[in-house]
């Protein structure tokens, strides 16, 4: 059974996504810190919605997260899980065994932004039991594998 993770109060309050994915046979994990109640009072709490989802959806679990007072973490991917587009193309070619046709332009695409590498060392100090579940190569391997399956299905007409 696949698992979907829905984070934040918006994911819990607007839980149509949780119900939809549950109907598709997925196990759902809701993650929330209920900061709405801190900022807007108990009437804005998301705890009631988490309880409602637990009662309605057989494969729903809720996890509250520990937020340190005043701490903000930019998890991003750090260098561990980040690469440039050219590095990604190189990895895809190495993993798939295929050459990718691409072109490079000096003109930036609309919406592009500067590449940012997050520093997760403070989070790692605060939560020493946390570690990456994936590395960049594993993520690219899964993307290539998923794309390969979809391409094979399309070619076969399935």
Image (cartoon, rainbow, N blue to C red):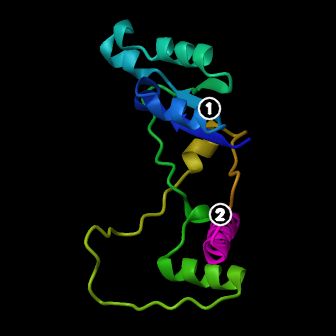
**Marks 2 and 1, how far apart at CA:** 20 Å
Q: Position of residue 2 (x, y in %)?
A: 69, 43
- At x 59%, y 63%, the residue is 81
Q: Quadrant of the N terminus?
A: top right
Q: Position of residue 135 (x, y in %)?
A: 68, 62
Above or below: residue 79 compared with residue 109: above
Q: Quadrant of the C terminus?
A: bottom right
The magenta region covers 136-158
Q: Which SS class for mark 1? A: strand
| Closer-to-camera residue (117/151) | 151
The label on residue 29 is 1
Please name the residue that numbered disc 2 is placed on. Answer: 139
- At x 66%, y 70%, the residue is 153
Q: Quadrant location of residue 29?
A: top right
- At x 61%, y 39%, the residue is 24
| Closer-to-camera residue (69/34) | 34
């Amino acid at each position: 059974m696949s698992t979907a993770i829905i984070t934040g109060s918006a994911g819990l309050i607007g839980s149509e996504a949780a119900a939809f994915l549950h109907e598709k046979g997925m196990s759902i994990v809701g993650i929330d810190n209920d900061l709405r109640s801190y900022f807007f009072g108990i009437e804005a709490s998301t705890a009631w919605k988490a309880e409602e989802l637990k009662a309605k959806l057989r494969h729903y679990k809720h996890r509250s997260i520990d937020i340190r007072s005043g701490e903000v973490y930019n998890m991003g991917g750090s260098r561990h899980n980040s690469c440039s587009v050219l590095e990604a193309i190189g990895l895809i070619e190495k993993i798939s065994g295929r050459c990718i046709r691409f072109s490079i332009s000096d003109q930036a695409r609309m919406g592009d932004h500067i590449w940012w590498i997050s520093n997760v060392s403070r989070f790692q100090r605060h939560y020493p039991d946390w570690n990456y579940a994936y590395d960049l190569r594993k993520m690219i391997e899964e993307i290539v594998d998923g794309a390969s399956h979809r391409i094979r299905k399309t070619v076969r007409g399935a």
